Image (cartoon, coloured by chain):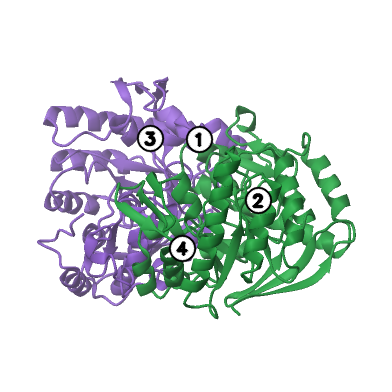
Chain colours: A purple, B green
Amino acid sequence: MAVRYELIKTCAQTGARLGRLHTPHGIIDTPTFMPVGTQATVKGMAPEELKDLGAQIILGNTYHLFLRPGHELIREAGGLHRFMNWDRPILTDSGGFQVFSLSENRKITEEGVQFRSHLNGDKLFLSPEAATEVQNAFGSDIMMAFDECPPYPAEYEYVKRSTERTSRWAERCLKAHTRPHEQALFGIVQGGMHTDLRRQSAADLTSLDFPGYAMGGLSVGEPKALMYEMLEETVPLLPGGKPRYLMGVGSPDALVEGSIRGVDMFDCVLPTRIARNGTLMTSQGRLVVRNAKYVSDFSPLDPECSCYACEHYSRAYIRHLVKADEMFGLRLTTIHNLHFLVELMRQVREAIREDRLRDFRDEFFDKYGMEGNESGF
Amino acid sequence: MAVRYELIKTCAQTGARLGRLHTPHGIIDTPTFMPVGTQATVKGMAPEELKDLGAQIILGNTYHLFLRPGHELIREAGGLHRFMNWDRPILTDSGGFQVFSLSENRKITEEGVQFRSHLNGDKLFLSPEAATEVQNAFGSDIMMAFDECPPYPAEYEYVKRSTERTSRWAERCLKAHTRPHEQALFGIVQGGMHTDLRRQSAADLTSLDFPGYAMGGLSVGEPKALMYEMLEETVPLLPGGKPRYLMGVGSPDALVEGSIRGVDMFDCVLPTRIARNGTLMTSQGRLVVRNAKYVSDFSPLDPECSCYACEHYSRAYIRHLVKADEMFGLRLTTIHNLHFLVELMRQVREAIREDRLRDFRDEFFDKYGMEGNESGF
């Protein structure tokens, strides 16, 4: 088995779990946030900087890497870890989400998905077997089963057919997987916002005995309350001895709420994407450093933060860099936001260890100035 | 005196000088190459990375910083060093070159230059007094006198009038300078490609007893042989106890040829600018990493290089990043090119110490595959 989940304890105040995920490239403390390195790089960051801020695992996007530079090149390089000089764990998604959100001229059949590259219009095909082969070439520690992520909102009948197909695809991924001892393949529970379909999907996938389970098709535009409801329906159906991964979630409030509901892993482009626009996550809430009021503010982005950006640079300097389109500005805002989420998850784990995650949530939300559980992201 | 030049020795094979420039923020081994940090950042680089690759001094551009974020903000921040978190020496230019190359609707009078900002069209004015005040606000270790850099080619009469005005402006800069003990103000010898005007300019400026002298108006489009001829005419007219700075020169061959002719300091955007286009300086010559032939080349950019990029990443990976417009690709190519020039200057200093700079030049040019003294830059 390529990965092993070790449950350390469950929070007495919530359903949150403190654990460790053992992988071929190292141990991940859970619950964890995974920075996204779409094109074999977390935008703007060196691997050493990711390590310095405490990232234990990063994510790669199969769709993007399949298009460019291609999985055969990455295989030839000795795998994704060697190609990009990252020796800690890597999780790759299956490409499913991007095929449905980025590609053009999609045609879905039972066999798989035919589509055109959003880069150059090339006609391409991904299937459970192809997505598995591509991820085997990457050598990621954790691979994801090829799925369809239905849009929100969507007709019940569409979601039903899609979810059933995703279950059949999951079985084909397991069969196609050639390196189960080196790479763990996780199943993805779908079912849209329909509790009966979520239950069916969870039953289908757990019967296949994956080493870990993701919840997909959430954080796709639905209200957060609905997402939490779906989590509450789904998480209890997943085996306690396996890790649980909530895909595409990265707002501070949702990381805390997700952990409370028993999620172990999260990923999202949110912190890195908003950083490139000069928007920061801070202990006092959202901060848009481009705003004129920071023009001569020589305090750090977040006075309570100990990241490289906050230790050495002022809001005034970072504002100048962002306004002047200077790369170093984006490096600093990216470092800060990733540090903020990694540090938040460390605090979440500490709170679980001390059976006070609900108290932590209340204090954090209060300080963060959240309006009705919404962090502004 | 804010700076002191210490001559260690002169090369027995050439006119090259090994020296040390003592400044308020540290010692610079000369001859030296100064990376350019136009907008209070060397594009893409953290200060720590510049130190790691051996940069002892960087340059800031007065024109750009005057426009944005403005010298009053930098003064308020405690100076440019503090604003940008760089505690080693900084040299700022006078803004003259950019006023004449970047701004719009220029009007030159004896008083100074009226122009419009290339960013937003604002009507602005720079004069010897203003450029000096701005640089005093920056707190740079070395400031430059406000000059006009005549275009090439230009009419003799135009260059003559311009050069004479630059001499008068230099005197006004000296008078306006309020911090001579903390900041050294260098004069700039102009004179275009006319030896009599160069001689006159050198005589005018040395009579004012600046703590250092630059040669401006070179590397502006003229053949390199003509630039070297101008250097050979001008350098002997400058006092041996003061540093000599050749502005805007950064091709590997010109750094070696300039050192041979007694230049101590160089700066240029060339290494950082071409890096952002994926063009590298290597011990085997120019390398364009975007080229298809590097698609699966897993060797480093330069097999003889020990920089961070060459130690950890392949041409194939860097090509992928550059093609995918990933910031980290530009960081790696920038690190490499700056390391290449800083390391080249270290080798030049070693060759001077061992009285073999002419031999070094021949070996370097031969290996570099230069055609008739041209490095391809």
- The label shown at residue B323 is 1
Q: Name the secondary structure under disc 3.
A: loop
Three-letter amino acid code at the position of disc 4: Pro
Pinpoint the chain carrying mark 4: B
How crowded pointer 1 is (Cα within 10 Å; few <14, some 14-19, many 20+) is rated as some
Q: Position of residue B202 (x, y in %)?
A: 67, 59
Cα separation between marks 4 and 3: 60 Å
| Three-letter code for the amino acid on which mark 1 is drawn | Lys
Q: What kind of residue is marked 2?
A: Leu
Give the residue at the far left of this rendering: A372
Dot 2 or dot 4, earlier in sequence? 4
> In the displayed structure, would residue B240 be above or below residue B288?
below
* Percent position of residue A89, x then y: 49, 53
Amino acid type, residue under disc 3 in the picture: Gly
Instruction: Give me the chain letter of mark 3.
Output: A
Marks 4,3: beta carbons within 8 A: no
**Front of the two marks 3 and 2:** 2
Residue that numbered label 3 is attached to: A95
